[in-house]
Amino acid sequence: MLGRPTHATRLLGCIALVATVTVASHAAAAKRSDPSPAITIKVGSMTVNGMRVKNLKCTLVNGGFLAAAKVVGALAKKRKALRACARGKKVRPRVSWRFKARSVTHVKVRNVARPKVRGCVARVMLGVRVGLSGSCTATLLLP
């Protein structure tokens, strides 16, 4: 049903996911420059292939219920590089990024005091490839 949130819980192999998915109404979508309905996904915490995130929120043009797993799975492919940015220290950057098709187009890193770590995380995030379009914000749990 459009405009109403649906709640679901799924266990898929190594992915445990609890999410809220909301599909914007067609009337709201028509007001935006992109006529596609937006999908908003909120996940309290998720781990995919060792990559842990908290408070993930994505607004996507395409995707679906498993889009959150796809986003975190794409981050997991850069897990080693992200961990290298932390240099063995406990770091919890809050990262916002926009992506179109496969490319990340904009990254903002907050909640990190050290500029070198912030810059490293931003550079790694620019290399993340997701086959979706939209934007996300998440806290990355490093290492």
Image (tube, grey):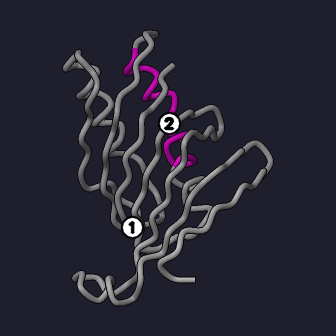
Q: Residues within 10 Å of mark 2 (few under 14, many from 20)?
A: some
Q: Quadrant of the N terminus?
A: bottom right
- Under mark 2, the amino acid is Lys
In this rendering, which labeled residue sits more in front, label 1 or label 2? Answer: 2
Q: Is residue 75 above or below residue 85?
A: below
- Under mark 1, the amino acid is Ser
| Residue lying farthest to the left in this orientation | 115
- On the image, which quarter does residue 100 sit in? bottom left
21 and 4: which one is in front? 4
Q: Is residue 115 magenta?
A: no
Residue on which the image places disc 2: 54
Q: Residue at x 75, y 55 (%)?
A: 10
Q: Is residue 130 above or below residue 23?
A: above
Q: Residues within 10 Å of mark 1 (few under 14, many from 20)?
A: some
Q: Position of residue 86 (x, y in %)?
A: 39, 17
Q: Is residue 78 magenta?
A: yes
47 and 20: which one is in front? 20
Q: Residue at x 38, y 52 (%)?
A: 136
Q: Residue at x 19, y 20 (%)?
A: 115
Left or right placement of residue 4 versus residue 138 in this view: right
Q: Position of residue 39 (x, y in %)?
A: 46, 70
Proximity of marks 1 and 2: CB atoms separated by less than 8 Å? no
Left or right placement of residue 112 versus residue 46 in this view: left
- On the image, which quarter does residue 108 sit in? top left
What is the secondary structure assignment of the residue under circle 1? Answer: loop
Q: Earlier in the sequence, mark 1 or mark 2?
A: 2
- On the image, which quarter does residue 50 sit in? top right
Q: Residue at x 35, y 28 (%)?
A: 93
What is the secondary structure assignment of the residue under circle 2? Answer: strand
Magenta range:
72-86
Numbered mark located on residue 133 in the image = 1
Magenta-drawn stretch, dominant element (helix, strand or loop):
helix
